Amino acid sequence: MNAINSIDSTLLNPPLGVRSIPFHLVTGFLGSGKTTFLKEFLSQFSDKYRIAVVQNEFAESGIDGKELQESGWKFDLLEVNKGSVFCVCLFSDFRSQLNNFVEEYKPDVVVLEATGLADPIAISELLMDTQLQKKLYLAGVWTVIDAVHYQKVKKMPAVMNQILIADTVLVNKMDLISAGAIELIKTEVLQINPLAQLYCTTYCQMPFDNIVEKKLLRQDGKPVGAIKDVYTQVFRTSNPVKRKNVDYLIKTLNEDTYRLKGYIVTENNEAFMIQSVFGQTKLVPVTKSMFGTEIISIGRKNIDFDYLLRKMVLINK
């Protein structure tokens, strides 16, 4: 096991009886419409839930925070300025701030709007914080694309990674470009992330309730009960994975696994995106653009990843 970068799963499990709070990450390049997205999100949910919003800007002044407060919707706000929360220079302090913020306001939902310049690929590092593990679970990753300027920024690493980690992608400002240009963007986004849910929007207007409430809290139309005692695990390895053992991993997943998502690189130098919701799993080939396997698992049942890695990883001798 020396070659495997695994994590002590006992450090990631919240104590029994602790209520875990859904955490949503919102990404997108500068000017794509992330604050507009938040306004729309708040308009649909602020009367139902106590929402905590975290806004991250590179500038010292929180312009977007002021704009959001003027919307009139109810929410608690934490502003983190002067850099990206995913940068090593702010990461440690931000985890402490977020932990204290959640402890003080005890929200039902936490939404983080990352700065448009942020590369959010380090979201898994945030989930590995032992204190936050007791309070939060990753419920959704949203990426907002500026359809008008997408072709200018699409090759930037931060933009690529924003699309790569997304569960849901909003191709925003669709009213300002042609239908043909929209279809081209959709095709390119699905080449990067074949499992993303795609919505074409104007002013980020979409039926959030169909995704946030029904998908997360229901299975086959039936309530699954309160989300509590949620276990989150993250693992990475640079070693190739046996392709036949990927099938073994999929067979172990069931309705106790609320969500599992990530990338797997096999011994044949092939790459796959894996995503599972309540045990319903998709495995899609993708162009190899990552250096190794990385998977995040969220669920009621603690998956023994140490055991699975021993079964899955191909150790070269």
Image (tube, grey):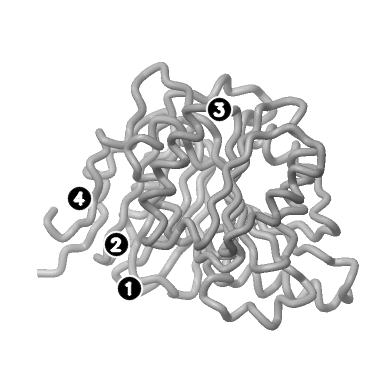
**Is residue 27 something one can see in this rendering?**
yes
Q: Which residue is mark 3?
A: 105
**Residue 310's mark?**
4
| Residue drawn at point x = 12 percent, y = 56 percent | 2
Q: Which residue is mark 2?
A: 241
Q: Name the N-terminal-most of marks 4 and 1.
A: 1
| Residue drawn at point x = 61 percent, y = 65 percent | 116
Callout 2 crowding tier (Cα within 10 Å): few <14, some 14–19, many ≥20: many
Q: Nearer the viewer, residue 161 or 221?
A: 161
Q: Quadrant of residue 44?
A: top right
> Label 4's element?
helix
Q: Is residue 152 left or right of residue 16?
A: right
Residue 231, horizontal then vertical, whole percent: 39, 33
The answer for how far apart the CA atoms under marks 1 and 3 are is 49 Å
In this rendering, which labeled residue sits more in front, label 3 or label 2? 3
> Label 1's element?
loop
The answer for how far apart the CA atoms under marks 1 and 2 are is 9 Å
| Residue drawn at point x = 33 percent, y = 31 percent | 13
Q: Name the N-terminal-most of marks 4 and 2.
A: 2
Callout 4 crowding tier (Cα within 10 Å): few <14, some 14–19, many ≥20: few
Residue 265, horizontal then vertical, whole percent: 36, 66
Q: Is residue 214 left or right of residue 72?
A: left
Q: Is residue 227 left or right of residue 240?
A: right
In this rendering, the answer to whether 109 lies above or below 149 is above
CB under 8 Å between callouts 1 and 2? no
CB under 8 Å between callouts 4 and 2? no
The amino acid marked with disc number 2 is Val
